Image (cartoon, grey):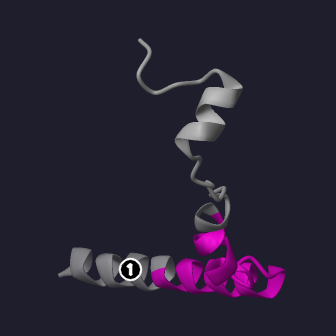
Amino acid sequence: MEILILLIFVSVLLVGVAVAFFAWTVKQGTFDQADRLALLPLDDEKTVTPTTEREEDENGNSADRL
């Protein structure tokens, strides 16, 4: 029975530490840009412009050559 009281005390202490850590991170502003940072890799893509065969021939980069 004594171990049960000890386990309850330890679990309440761990929950208190977790809540305090969460409150500290919110106060520091860690989660302020979470939505923007999640979408940042999608903005890195470069737009690709299609080239015609004539432009490829002028540049010397034909798709037929190996």
Seen from the viewer's position, the closer of residues 4 and 42 is 42
**Chief secondary structure of the magenta portion:** helix
Q: Quadrant of the C terminus?
A: top left
Residue at x 64% of width, y 59% of height: 47
Question: Looking at numbered disc 1 in the image, what kind of residue is underneath it?
Answer: Ser
Residue at x 59% of width, y 47% of height: 51
Seen from the viewer's position, the closer of residues 26 and 36 is 36
- The single residue placed furthest to the left in the displayed view is 1
Residue at x 58% of width, y 66% of height: 42
Q: Position of residue 24 (x, y in %)?
A: 74, 81
Instruction: Find disc 1 in the rendering and name its residue.
Output: 11
Seen from the viewer's position, the closer of residues 54 and 8 is 54
* Quadrant hosting residue 58: top right
- The single residue placed furthest to the right in the displayed view is 28
Q: Is residue 15 left or right of residue 1?
A: right
Secondary element under disc 1, as helix, strand or loop, is helix
The span shown in magenta is 15-40
Q: Is residue 45 left or right of residue 63?
A: right
